[in-house]
Image (spheres, grey):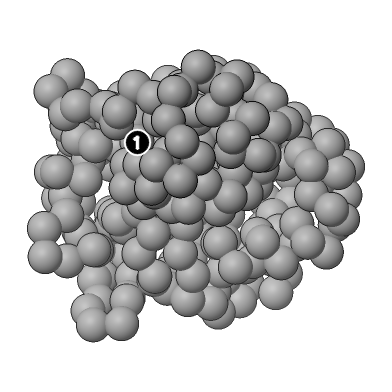
Amino acid sequence: MSRGRARLAIGKGMSVWALEAPAGFGDIRTHSHHAIQLTASRDGQVALTDASSGIDAKCVAVASDAKHRLEGQGLLLFIFVEPESLAGRALSAALFGLSRLAAINSRAFLDTLITLEEAFDDGMSVEDMLAIGRRAVGSLVSVKDPPLPDQRVLRVIEHIRIAEDQNLAEVAEAAEVYLSPSRLRHLFAEQTGLPFRTYVLWLKLMRAMEIYAAGQSLTAAAHEAGFADSPHFSRTFRRTFGLPATALSRF
């Protein structure tokens, strides 16, 4: 697969990507990731499939942890939203019923998101990209009503975002969560949909992409984010997004 130009903006609870799909982008493997995915195509349709259904539309959505395969061409625009956030919970309630895939039939969403094509100009900052992402999501849902996860789980998530602790008992003590490790492990999986260690790996992957987007090499980003080595990062990225990280080329 050849490389395609990409701009990435990683923020708390959300990341926004603008990607000029390289040749062979349609060969993305079936994969899944923890974030809710919203994708739009400037130049055509996006084809999205899972084990039982398929969608071909200008804008599509994938539920958290849903196995899927995506095909598209030209400029593709992505928003990845953490499902535990207010926006994530609102999107889950609004978009996904019996199916884990959905077409987004909102002109306001597309019109907002398409302004990300300006990300390939020098003037668009990470903050500007994230602001566009928030406006696009806001065109689909209100984020005021859906409840957040248990506050104890939120404190654990906030702690592992800023610390390197990966032992659940130590994290619970640091976050002042007064539950036994077994009870907290069950509550965490119940509230987030992922085991604790898998969630930590997801956050490490997001951190590595944030470092890469800021200008570091993929190898340096993998090391700084806490991966054992570059191959471990590469395997995790491909399993999560269905394509190699090297397919993304900054400019």
x then y, percent, for residue 134: 35, 25
Residue 98 placement, left or right of 218 = left
Graded by Cα atoms within 10 Å as few (under 14), some (14 to 19) or many (20 or more), the crowding at tag 1 reads many
For this rendering, which residue is in front, 18 or 65?
65
- Residue beneath disc 1: 84
x then y, percent, for residue 153: 40, 30
Q: Is residue 101 above or below residue 150?
A: below
What residue type is disc 1 on? Glu
Q: Is residue 207 above or below residue 92?
A: above
Q: Quadrant of the C terminus?
A: top right
Residue placed at 24% from the left, 37% from the top? 89
Q: Is residue 113 above or below residue 156?
A: below
Secondary structure beneath dot 1 equals: loop
Residue placed at 46% from the left, 64% from the top? 32
Residue 211 placement, left or right of 124 = right
Can you tell which quarter of the image residue 121 is in? top right
x then y, percent, for residue 67: 39, 70
Q: Quadrant of the N terminus?
A: bottom right
Residue 208 seen from this side = yes
Tally of numbered tags:
1
Residue 53 placement, left or right of 250 = left
Residue placed at 23% from the left, 82% from the top? 52
For this rendering, which residue is in front, 108 or 207?
207
Can you tell which quarter of the image residue 210 is in? top right
